């Protein structure tokens, strides 16, 4: 029976266990979106995970609206990421970077321009900004002539990731951000070749993924989707058809692995009554499948044993337990995560969570 602690091949990465670190926005970069030294400490502490998927990282100023989140479009950012990846590798770990364009989920006070999206829509609620939360703005639809340039920003970010020392990239196509806004029929009202039919709505995902694969190799490219229900205001009337088609497209490209975020009806960080799509996607995507959302050790082991998943990504448990792999192996207590410090600047709630050994020594 496959165990959480068995190795798994994820494209070019040989992960020593199947406990992956999910991408987690933390807000510890500078206001200019440059990584800071404390980030090297944070990721190094978690290097025992089979693979670290970094926090979402902006591919362009246009697409990065989260205060103090890192980017990877400039030489300065690349140079500042290098000590982070080196720290992880020196600790025996592996790390890939998640490539992020937020689409309509940004505010112009952060990016300096009107948000862009598939269509002229706005998210309900408020965007994070340096001046507090502000109402989301109506996005400007990307002109079809702009899409090749958008794809080129993903390619440049992928090249930068390799230069920064990352072992690969993950294309963020989940959680209601730009690619997800193109995928779903409640946010994409285009009448050109990127809208309307499922095939057209999947097109941007397919073209971005293929371009990044052509740039750095399929074995260093993964994708994240959130296929079941509403995610930050985007949704689809027929998720089974849409995400089966997306899985088919990604399978044909041959990416290293596919990660799915699938909150349930009792989710603790997002909820959905839409059934999990992973059993269906498993039939359409033949590569390694990584599942995420509210997993504990027994549930993770059950989905591995059934063959539904090849690995499980843990978010908040790894945020609060840098030695989560050891804790799961030993059946030790799991520290709760403190939400008040998720996005604050500084060490508190970031690099001061204790390991099991530290707790035992203190006791």
Image: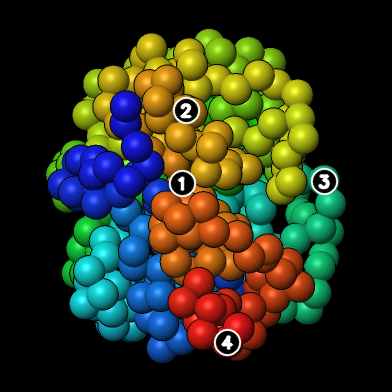
Front position among marks 2 and 3:
2
Mark 2 vs mark 3, CA separation in Å: 34 Å
Mark 2 secondary-structure assignment: helix
Which residue is under mark 4? 362
Q: State which quadrant residue 81 falls in.
A: bottom left
Mark 2 vs mark 4, CA separation in Å: 35 Å
Which residue is under mark 3? 124
Mark 3 secondary-structure assignment: loop
Mark 4 vs mark 1, CA separation in Å: 29 Å
Mark 3 vs mark 4, CA separation in Å: 46 Å
What residue is at 44 percent from the left and 66 percent from the top?
Answer: 323
Say few, some or many: other residues with alpha carbon within 10 Å of mark 4 (under 14 / 14 to 19 / 20 or more): few
Mark 4 secondary-structure assignment: helix
What residue is at 32 percent from the left and 53 percent from the top?
Answer: 50
Residue farthest along the front direction in this orientation: 363
Quadrant holding the N terminus: top left
Which colour scheme appears in the figure?
rainbow
Mark 1 vs mark 3, CA separation in Å: 29 Å
Q: Is residue 326 left or right of residue 82?
A: right
């Amino acid at each position: 029976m496959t165990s959480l602690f068995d190795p798994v091949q994820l494209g070019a990465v040989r992960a020593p266990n199947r406990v992956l670190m999910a991408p987690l926005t933390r807000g510890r970069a500078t206001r200019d979106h440059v990584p800071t030294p404390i980030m090297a400490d944070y990721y190094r502490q978690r290097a025992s995970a089979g693979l670290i998927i970094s926090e979402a990282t902006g591919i362009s100023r246009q697409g990065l609206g989260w205060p103090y989140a890192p980017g990877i479009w400039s030489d300065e950012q690349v140079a500042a990421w290098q000590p982070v990846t080196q720290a992880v590798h020196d600790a025996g770990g592996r790390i890939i970077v998640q490539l992020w364009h937020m689409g309509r989920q940004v505010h112009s006070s952060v990016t300096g321009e009107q948000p862009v999206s598939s269509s002229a829509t706005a998210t309900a609620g408020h965007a994070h900004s340096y001046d507090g939360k502000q109402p989301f703005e109506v996005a400007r639809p990307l002109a079809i002539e702009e899409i090749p340039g958008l794809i080129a920003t993903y390619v440049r970010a992928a090249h930068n990731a390799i230069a920064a020392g990352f072992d690969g990239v993950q294309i963020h196509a989940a959680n209601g951000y730009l690619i997800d806004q193109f995928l779903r029929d409640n946010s994409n009202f285009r009448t050109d070749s990127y809208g309307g039919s499922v095939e057209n709505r999947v097109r941007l995902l397919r073209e971005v993924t293929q371009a990044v694969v052509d740039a750095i190799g399929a074995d260093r490219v993964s994708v994240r989707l959130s296929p079941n229900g509403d995610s930050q205001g985007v949704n689809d009337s027929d998720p089974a058809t849409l995400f089966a088609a997306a899985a088919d497209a990604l399978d044909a490209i041959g990416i290293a692995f596919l990660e799915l975020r699938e909150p349930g009806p009792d989710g603790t960080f997002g909820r959905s009554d839409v059934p999990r799509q992973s059993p269906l996607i498993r039939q359409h995507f033949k590569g390694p499948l990584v599942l995420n959302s509210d997993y504990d050790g027994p549930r993770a082991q059950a989905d591995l044993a059934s063959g539904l998943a090849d690995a499980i990504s843990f978010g908040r448990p790894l945020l609060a337990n840098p030695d989560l792999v050891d804790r799961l192996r030993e059946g030790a207590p799991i520290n709760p995560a403190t939400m008040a410090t998720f996005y604050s600047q500084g060490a508190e709630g970031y690099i001061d969570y204790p390991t099991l050994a530290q707790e035992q020594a203190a006791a």
